[in-house]
Amino acid sequence: MISRAALARNAQQAVRRSWAARPAQQRTLASAASSSGAFETSDGSGLKVASRDSHGPTTKLAIVAKAGTRFQPLPGLTVGLEEYAFKNTQRRTALRITRESELLGGQLASSHTREALILEASFLRDDLPYFAELLAEVVSMTKYTTHEFHEEIEPVLRIKQNNFYNNVAALALDNAHSVAFHTGLGSSVYPTPSTPSKKYLNEEYIASFADAVYTKPSLALVADGASSQDVSKWVGQFFNDVQSSAQSGQKFDATATKYYGGEQRTTHTGGNAMVIAFPGSAYTAPKPEVAVLAALLGGKSTIKWSTGYSLLSKATSDVVGLNVSASNIPYSDAGLLAVQLSGPAASVRAGAEATVKSLESIANGSVPKEEVAKAVANAKFNALDATQLREPSLHLVGSGIVNTGKAYEPASLVQGIEKVSAESLKNAAKALLEGKASVSSVGDLFLLPYAEQLGLRV
Amino acid sequence: MVSLAPFIVKRPWLHKLMMPISKWYVNAAGYRKMGLRYDDLYEEEREAVQIALKRLSPKEAYERVYRIRRAAQCSYQHKLLPKNEWINDQTDVPYLAPIIKQVEAELAEKDALDAATVIRKAH
């Protein structure tokens, strides 16, 4: 039996120890605060490298390749390449890669967006050389074997595809992209289940796509939590095998994106979703009004236990089961200001009507000044927070580098946001309502409205 | 299984000496006269062979089944194939053995990794 006095003594000691430890902690916090949150970019033998050191104990290293679904010459190649990440290489097997990373406590992941393919590794700071070598190996030495394609990649692909096509919200957003941009950015993020996959997707096509996109000009290496000297040292050592141009001489460059707009309606038994989208803001030419408009429409409360200031959350507070959010989805040369709604069909219909009404009220100028001020502050926070958080900042910086040659900087966008007034917001909303919208509805089409009924032009 | 083959192959003079004997043995075994390749004889009940068979290309898998059925037919009829259809040195190519070897290496690596002990470096 431990006496109470002994426990109390231990507790006191613990408290005293934590006080003693304070000065050391404060020192590390101070040094973290002294480093700026921006990424340093450098050029390591043709490969663009961005790094940021927050002096934390963990590091995230990511390769961002210009190989998103926008750039794929055949449907599914991006997804195939994503699945081939961390599979057998010339040096070691997939199993060994997995087990070794597990032993080091690392996490490996691959994902893709419409513009980028991202291979990332998160690990303890000291293991940088191991994971730098691993990522270089994945990019330059993957074997793309037939049996892995049949045994491991195809089944996973089918499952992911089914998952995607049973998620009505994702499907609605995908359809909205396809009506907005048609080809390129509009191509589906997952090949449709009805795509004849045998015709377009096999390991040889994936290998030749990899040959074209895993080249130094279309790659960026982004490190968060590692010093730039360390990163450039290991990049110089390990990334020499990455080819500087495709052996086959192929190149998949995207044509400039054009906004079309239109409407698409799909029946689905898995739920109801609608996306109402308008031309948005791109990385390269950010439109601050669009960012503020997205914040003002909002939909999700940013403060707990309140509906929040945003127009959509106020307008739909009594609609049961509706999930609504407005956001600007940026790409390198285009963007989509999308209001995503999902929930019961009647609620989605009510939400869609509320969305158009809210936009009209902004265009009328009947939104109070202080609401606009709140939206400006929120949009500014969102823009800056995205560059601060690890995950979104890696994507932003990587896509910025591969698409425009330099890291994404929020400064110009933030300055623009600060200058947005109720008047400029009114004009922006008016222009959106006068232009063509992209509307996609998935689910119970008897209840979900047509764009025409909502009062939108498509 | 203990095999003398690697020992012999390493020594060219011995290899040369044994070649005629091995040729005689292969022909005497008789599988070539029934239209089978050596790789058709692997016992299918092993895990590695099962996996390797799944990794054959559709054409190879089809031809393998064709050869085995033809040999079974020969066996029922107590006949050999006509001489021009016999498998010879040129056509008796190992199409399955390399895959089996690769699968066995994978399985062995898996077992080794499952039994690995981690030695931490002293800090």
Image (tube, coloured by chain):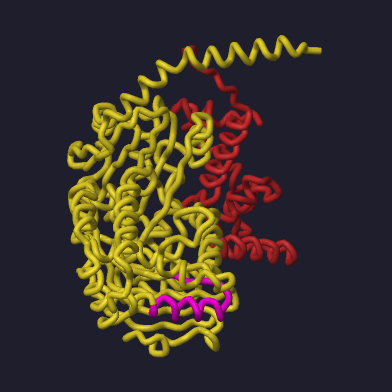
Q: Which image quarter holds the N terminus of chain A? A: top right
Chain displayed in yellow: A
Give coordinates of residue A187: x percent, y percent.
35, 71
Residue at point 56% right, 81% down? A346
Instruction: Please provide the residue range marked out in magenta.
Output: A340-357
Residue B5 in which image quadrant = top right
Number of numbered discs visible in the structure rendering = 0
Percent x, y of residue A417: 23, 57
Is residue A162 found inside the magenta-colored segment of the image?
A: no
Instruction: Choose between A16 and A64: the one closer to the eye.
Output: A16
Residue B37 in picture, x, y percent from top left: 57, 53
User: Of A365 and A329, which appears nearest the observer?
Assistant: A365
Give the residue at x 51% y 67%. Answer: A323
Please indicate, yes or no, whether residue A240 appears anywhere in the rendered image.
Answer: yes
Taken as a whole, is the magenta stretch helix, strand or loop? helix
Front-lying residue, A12 or A43:
A12
Q: Which chain is rendered red in the image? A: B
Residue at 59 percent across and 28 percent down: it is B4
Extreme residue toward the right, this view: A1
Residue under the point 54% across and 12% down: A16
Residue A253 visible in this rendered orientation of the protein: no
- Tell me if A116 is positioned left or right of A7 in this view: left
In which quadrant of the rendered image does the C terminus of chain A lie?
bottom left
